[in-house]
Image (spheres, rainbow, N blue to C red):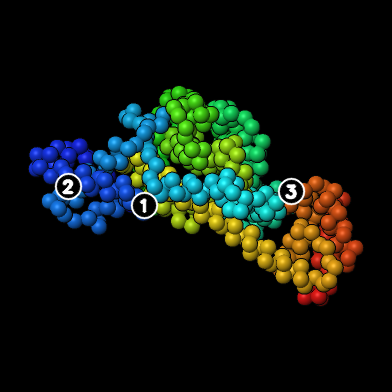
Amino acid sequence: MKFPQSPPTWQPLLDRVIQQGTVDVFMEYGHQDALKSGCYLHWDEFRYGAADKDGLTKEEQWAAIRMGRSMRSQPIPLVDLKGQAFTFFLTSKAFGLLREIDLRSGAGPSGSAMVREETSGYEFDSLVEEALTSSQLEGAVVTRSEAREMIRSQRTPATEHERMVMNNYRTMRLLAELKEHPLTPELILRIHREVTAGTLQSPARDGEFRTAADDVRVEDEESGEVLHTPPADSLLPGRIEKLCDFANEQGTHGFMHPVLRAILLHFWIAYDHPFVDGNGRTARALFYWSMLRNGYWLAEYFSISHEILKAPKQYYRAFLHTETDGNDLNYFLLHQLEIIRASIESLKESIRTKQEAAEVLRRNLGEGSDFNHRQIALLKHALKHPFASYTVVGHQTSHGTSNQTAKNDLTDLEQRGLLLRGKVGKAFVYSPVADLAGKLGL
């Protein structure tokens, strides 16, 4: 990925504008940027569309924009290698995205929000999607069907890549419990240990911060260019303590929107890169921890990694734009707000599609049918995969239900003549009957 061009330093350009007597025009450019609701451009993008105008060079126009942004910004406790603080301010676009996320995540009127009853049947699919795509962002080569089959059956992962997916899945399930605990260095290490177990070259490094012996840096996979060098390991204890204070709402004065705090935790871990590997997975897990801790229960169902994976270079570019433009966090914040909105929309669309398909199946099951949503999901899968097999444990895992409920579902389908029961070892295994579609009247 091409490293973005660093912007020109804006303060000397301001001095030049003052000498030229074009301060009024200069200030107007900064004001107009503040009113824009569209793209928040980095110099690397701005320079291509700009031209000398109104007596100002494109560099001077940029200086006006950058000064206006700096004047509105506020710092967070995170600092760079030179001790300069990272800053942000809320643009009108950010306000709008936060409002939309609040409404659609359950914080607004009931008519606009998704409800638990609507999403509860899709928890398994959502957790598998996040577990899979978060792993794929880090290079894992696993298909969606392989991930679903492994997690559904709870079989032992056959490869390191499958282990990454299983680790992420189990970590996502664990976050619902961990959200009750304040963030501590020990909790961060536990999350890292969960996502990396069995995947690092040295197993002893699971749940350990990097040391002076570790040459940790972020490089472009194609060119080998160094994109980011994290702070020295000796600084990590103090930086992690500050991160925990920030996560626990002790590191800032006044109110900070919970979604912004969650996104900034994501960025902070990625910037400090405290581990030899697994930093991205840990950062995204902490984002979910923070969202769930602040009552955004829908975060358990949507997948940001699914959306990031559609355009991963934009994700990494958002980090670089922040780091190369005076630590301006707005680039990353706006990118992630868009990702969250898209994740919620994808979840809503997925539920709508599945509900429509389930309704078609219900209509075709015949008068008086009383299959529950779990059984309908299994039948839909069986119609597409006539040689599939199902177990009580797999059905239980897929739908997050009790062992007895899962057993009742499969026994009922067997008694209706839709599944055949066999035995593998000591476990019962259920498979679709030969003419399942005919039995269902389809």
Q: Residues within 10 Å of mark 3 (few under 14, many from 20)?
A: some
As helix, strand or loop, the secondary structure at mark 2 comes to helix
Horizontally, is 32 left or right of 333 in the view? Answer: left
At label 3, the amino acid type is Gly
Circle 2/circle 3 CB separation < 8 Å = no
Would you place residue 10 above or below residue 157 in this image?
A: above
State the image quarter where residue 80 is shown. top left
Whole-percent x and y of residue 405? 83, 50
- Which residue in the rendered view is the most extreme toward the right? 415
Horizontally, is 93 left or right of 378 in the view? Answer: left
Whole-percent x and y of residue 13? 17, 41
Checking the image for residue 25, the label placed there is 2
Mark 1 and mark 2: span between their CA atoms? Answer: 21 Å
At label 2, the amino acid type is Val
Q: Which residue is mark 1?
A: 37
At label 1, the amino acid type is Ser
- The residue at 68%/63% (across/down) is 355
Q: Which residue is mark 3?
A: 400
Horizontally, is 322 left or right of 385 in the view? Answer: left
As helix, strand or loop, the secondary structure at mark 3 comes to loop
Mark 3 / mark 1, whichever is N-terminal: 1
From the image, which quarter does the C terminus lie in?
bottom right
Which is nearer the eye, 302 or 164?
Answer: 302
Circle 3/circle 1 CB separation < 8 Å = no
Q: Is there any visible trace of residue 325 in the rendered image?
A: yes
As helix, strand or loop, the secondary structure at mark 1 comes to loop
- The residue at 34%/28% (across/down) is 83
Whole-percent x and y of residue 308? 49, 52
Would you place residue 167 above or below residue 408 in this image?
A: above
Mark 3 and mark 1: span between their CA atoms? Answer: 42 Å
Q: Residues within 10 Å of mark 1 (few under 14, many from 20)?
A: few
Horizontally, is 72 left or right of 302 in the view? Answer: left
